[in-house]
Amino acid sequence: QVQLVESGGGSVQAGGSLRLSCAAYGASYSTYCMGWFRQAPGKEREGVAAIEIGGSTTYADSVKGRFTASRDNAKNTLYLQMNSLTPEDTAMFYCAADFRRYPPCGRRHWTDFRYWGQGTQVTVSS
């Protein structure tokens, strides 16, 4: 059983930065696809970034140029560097992982991920 543990959330002012981490425990090998999702109150869960084991990364249009996802396969850890944060980025951020190679990592819906973290809150004030 894989357990994902996120950290790094918090409160910042608009224009600030945060770095989220997600450590995967219990995996005997690296998960193929890992992703970051977020959910604001009253809104659906949306994809933020997805990254394959080889490093190929896909971003939501709303975060392109501001967020950078990366992973350290040796440590089974996923990261999300978030810069130029705006109040619209306020949400609970979730880490997700899956061993399967399909669907393509960059085109997965949140229901295509088997393992989830508990979430970490990001709050951006104006």
Image (cartoon, grey):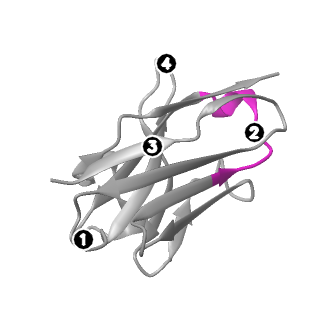
| Residue 46 covered by magenta stretch | no
> Mark 4 Cα within 10 Å, few/some/many (few <14, many 20+)?
few
- What residue type is disc 2 on? Leu
Cα distance between the residues tagged 3 and 2: 19 Å
> Is label 4 in a helix, a strand or a loop?
loop
- Give coordinates of residue 1: x percent, y percent: 15, 53
Q: Which residue is mark 2?
A: 85
Around disc 1, counting alpha carbons within 10 Å, would you say few (fewer than 14), some (14 to 19), or many (20 or more)? Answer: few
Precedes in sequence: disc 1 or disc 2: 2
Please give the residue where the numbered disc 1 appears in the rendered image: 102
Q: Residue at x 49, y 18 (%)?
A: 41
Mark 3: which secondary structure?
Answer: strand
Q: Residue at horizontal 21%, vertical 52%?
A: 114
Residue 111 seen anywhere in this rendered image of the structure: no
Q: Could you tell which of marks 3 and 2 lies nearer the N-terminus?
A: 3
Q: Which residue type does callout 3 highlight?
A: Glu
| CB contact under 8 Å: marks 3 and 1 | no
Foreground disc of the pair 2, 4 = 2
Question: Of circles 3 and 2, which is in front?
Answer: 3
Badge 3 or badge 4: first in the primary sequence:
3
Instruction: Determine which residue is flagged by label 3.
Output: 6
Q: Which residue is mark 4?
A: 41
Q: Quadrant of residue 106?
A: bottom left
Looking at the rendered structure, the kind of residue marked 4 is: Pro
Question: Disc 1 vs disc 2: which is toward the camera?
Answer: 2
Q: Which residue corresponds to the image point at 41% horizontal and 73% vertical from the top-left? A: 52
